[in-house]
Image (tube, coloured by chain):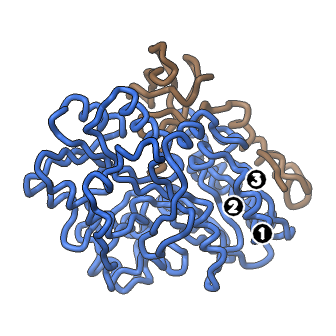
Amino acid sequence: MCLAIPGLIISISGEDPFERMGKVNFGGIAKEVNLAYVPEAKVGDYVIVHVGFAISTLDEEEANKTLEFLRQIEESNDSGPGNELESGEKET
Amino acid sequence: MKYIDEYRDSATANKFADAIRNIITRKWAIMEICGGQTHSIVKFGIDELLPESITLVHGPGCPVCVTPVELINKAIEIASKKNVIFCSFGDMLRVPGTQKDLLSVKADGGDIRIVYSPMDAVKIAGNNPNKEVIFFAVGFETTAPANAMAVYQAKKNNIKNFFLLVSHVLVPPAMEAILSSPLNLVQGFLAAGHVCTVMGFNEYIPIAEKYRVPIIVTGFEPVDILQGIYMCIKQLEKGRFQVENQYSRSVRKEGNLQAQELIKEVFKIVPRKWRGVGEIPQSGLGLNDGYRQFDAELKFSLSNITADESPDCIAGLVLQGQKKPNECPAFGTKCTPDFPLGAPMVSSEGACAAYYRYRRFDS
């Protein structure tokens, strides 16, 4: 049910912020998606779409961190990238 | 496809599996909350890549699975009425109620329509002013913004024949219920990436501290899950219990504030019954007082329907991670996707369906 997939915004229409719609391309299949919850999204951005609504705009820099994380593990001589986990937020 | 293919790359996945093997020194049990993650794990064989000292426990994150039988019975009663159009996501149609499922109501002539989005149901209501149109609003926090928008738009556009049968559930109270159980096995969590995309992860910080468990917000592709497991094992081995975000390409710490605002406008937090588990306080969403006129349970006066679970179905134990699907005596015999006893065998996110579809077991 929480299945959501990334797609590329190819056009945007609608003035009302609650009814802002985008045409989103999912690997060749284009679908109308409600963009009310991603006011920052623009044409050329990738969004995560769930039941017809975009719920986030994907951050390319953050996306690259997964591969960067792996490279750090491989490069480090001990059991991982030091005591600090480099990818993502760290809390508490 | 970008943002999918690179996270399914087998060489990268294998490197993460090697990295996990390099840091692990003892046995650990990690629960993946979301049924979508369970399906990825079983479908891609991620658990088979991992060292045997890691047990992956499948969590309750399948809204179809945790919807109680009595609510399915209520849906069936409403959908059987004349002058009603009953709209639902497809998964709900085959979940068994006490006597039958929604699909058999449809076969008997009920006007039941599978929709892609709750907004489709609002449109159907607008186009059919003489019918009562009900949307079966099941889901976790991920789906709440869409359902909130449907009700909000119905009110704004003065659509009075649209109603929600609400079965919304929340992840953090379910995690606390699992962690407080004396039978709990779980030592670390992979939190559900799309739930956190909407809600952020601030609410997980006190849980990690109180129960001393690492919680890694994790995505859904194989590489995401393996990285989440690596981060979790790393913390467990070092005796740490922090909230970390593996799925940072989609999840921000504060979540999606626009979505949270509309959820708060339309819904309030209520106690909710979970299938096979029972009632968990403050674990669900119900319609706010300003939106009561859209509540199907009030509209159809359904509050008296109760139901017992099937005695042969151990869905409650599976959903709490205390049993694996194949440990159920009915698995694959009395209970199959064609003739399910419980929702986890039906749903595309149910653990039983994942095991049935992707696994082979020696008898």
User: Against B40, is A42 above or below?
Assistant: above
* Image quarter of the C terminus of chain A: bottom right
Residue B59 location (% of width, % of height): 54, 67
Say which element carries label 1.
helix
Count neighbours of disc 1 (C-alpha within 10 A) and say few if under 14, some if 14 to 19, many if 20 or more. Answer: few
User: Against A52, is B299 above or below?
Assistant: below
Q: Nearer the viewer, residue B234 or B248?
A: B248
State the residue position of label 1. B210
Horizontally, residue A87 falls left or right of residue B136, namely right
Say which element carries label 2.
helix
Of badges 1 and 2, the one in the foreground is: 1
Q: Quadrant of residue A37?
A: top right
Say which element carries label 3.
strand
Q: Which label belongs to residue B229?
A: 2
Going from N to C along the chain, the mark reached first, 1 or 2, is 1
State the residue position of label 3. B244
**Which amino acid is tagged 2?**
Ile
**Which amino acid is tagged 3?**
Glu
Count neighbours of disc 3 (C-alpha within 10 A) and say few if under 14, some if 14 to 19, many if 20 or more. Answer: many
| Chain of the residue where label 3 is placed in the rendered structure | B
Of badges 2 and 3, the one in the foreground is: 3
Colour for chain A in the figure: brown
Q: Residue at x 54, y 55 (%)?
A: B269
